[in-house]
């Protein structure tokens, strides 16, 4: 949490005083959390979101993208902490790669469904979800109960696992030699928990177009059964961010589940 706070302070300095900044010190205030559904008319797609509201107005925005099989309710501890620190936190839920993939499936079918959902098509949908949500935030900021609540000049993207992939592509990761990109120029910083290199191609080529500040978090035991991503794979992203101000933190003995708020309890389908 401390390193996440420092990056946010560096990029979104308007939200906190850098002179005496303690990222773990939060006011004893009750965080208001609300759920909404955003309709992307162009794709006829509903994107559920959970919003954690700070007391202050005109504050920076942080978007969070859940892991494979997750929901807008994942990582609530982060949403509450960020809201207390003065950020407008928006947690997205991505149909097609959310908890509906496994919740009603029989035990033996769950992993099959999860692997199928970890597709490039769903990654593409996630990138488009982020763009649609930012579009809707602009509407909320102009009218209604959340008018003027957000500083949309400072938007950060964060996510865990498949959500980290989402953050990577929104930050500017490219595919097919630069022919495919989902970058959103409105995003000015990224936090990637359990990042991963592209399945094909040179990571250096894939990530060289990212030019915004990035924080990467992983662990020495950070492996996933989906895609068989290893801790060594996680470390391939950071050296490829040659054109971005970037920081990497590797936590000793941290597993893939550690970043989903489940400690070292091992695999769970909603945080991949």
Image (cartoon, rainbow, N blue to C red):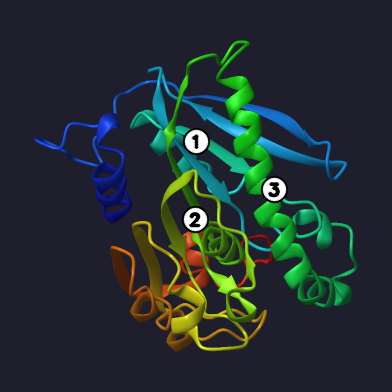
For the residue pair 252 and 138, the one nearer the viewer reads as 138
Query: 142 or 209: nearer the eye?
Result: 209
Q: Which mark is residue 261?
A: 2
Vertical relation: 266 (above or below) 42: below
Expressed as whole percent of the image width and height from the top left, the position of residue 215 reads: 35, 61
Q: Is 248 drawn above or below residue 220 in the view shown?
A: above
Residue 69 located left or right of residue 34: right
Determine whether label 3 and label 1 are within 8 Å by CB. Answer: no
- Which residue is painted at 82% across and 74% down in the image? 116
In primary-sequence order, the first of circles 3 and 1 is: 1
- Looking at the rendered structure, the secondary structure element under dot 1 is strand
Residue 268 position by quadrant = bottom right
Q: Are marks 2 and 3 in contact (CB under 8 Å)?
A: no
Label 1 crowding class (10 Å Cα cut-off): few <14, some 14-19, many 20+?
A: many
Q: How far across and how far down the image is residue 130, in percent?
A: 63, 47
Determine the CA span between mark 3 and mark 1: 16 Å
Report the side of 39 relative to 246 (left or right): right
- The residue labelled by disc 3 is 129
Residue drawn 69% across the image and 66% down it: 269
State the residue position of label 1. Answer: 89
Q: Residue at x 76, y 55 (%)?
A: 99
């Amino acid at each position: 949490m401390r390193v996440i706070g420092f990056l946010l302070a560096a990029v979104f300095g308007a939200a906190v005083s850098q002179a005496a900044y303690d990222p773990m010190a939060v006011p004893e205030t009750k965080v208001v959390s609300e759920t909404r559904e955003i309709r992307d008319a162009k794709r006829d797609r509903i994107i559920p979101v959970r919003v954690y509201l700070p007391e202050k107005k005109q504050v920076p925005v942080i978007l969070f993208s859940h892991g494979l099989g997750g929901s807008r309710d994942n990582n609530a501890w982060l949403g509450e902490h960020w809201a207390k620190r003065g950020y407008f936190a928006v947690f997205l839920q991505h149909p097609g790669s959310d908890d509906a993939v496994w919740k009603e499936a029989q035990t033996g079918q769950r992993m099959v469904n999860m692997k199928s959902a970890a597709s490039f098509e769903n990654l593409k949908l996630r990138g488009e979800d982020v763009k649609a949500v930012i579009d809707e935030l602009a509407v909320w900021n102009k009218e209604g109960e959340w008018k003027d609540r957000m500083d949309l000049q400072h938007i950060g993207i964060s996510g865990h696992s498949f959500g980290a992939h989402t953050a990577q592509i929104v930050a500017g990761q490219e595919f097919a030699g630069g022919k495919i990109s989902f970058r959103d120029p409105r995003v000015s910083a990224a936090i990637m928990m359990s990042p991963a290199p592209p399945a094909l191609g040179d990571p250096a080529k894939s990530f060289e177009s990212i030019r915004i500040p990035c924080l990467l978090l992983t662990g020495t035991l950070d492996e996933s059964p989906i895609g068989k991503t290893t801790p060594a794979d996680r470390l391939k992203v950071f050296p490829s961010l040659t054109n971005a101000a970037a920081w990497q933190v590797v936590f000793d003995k941290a597993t893939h589940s550690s970043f989903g708020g489940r400690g070292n309890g091992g695999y769970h389908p909603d945080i991949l």
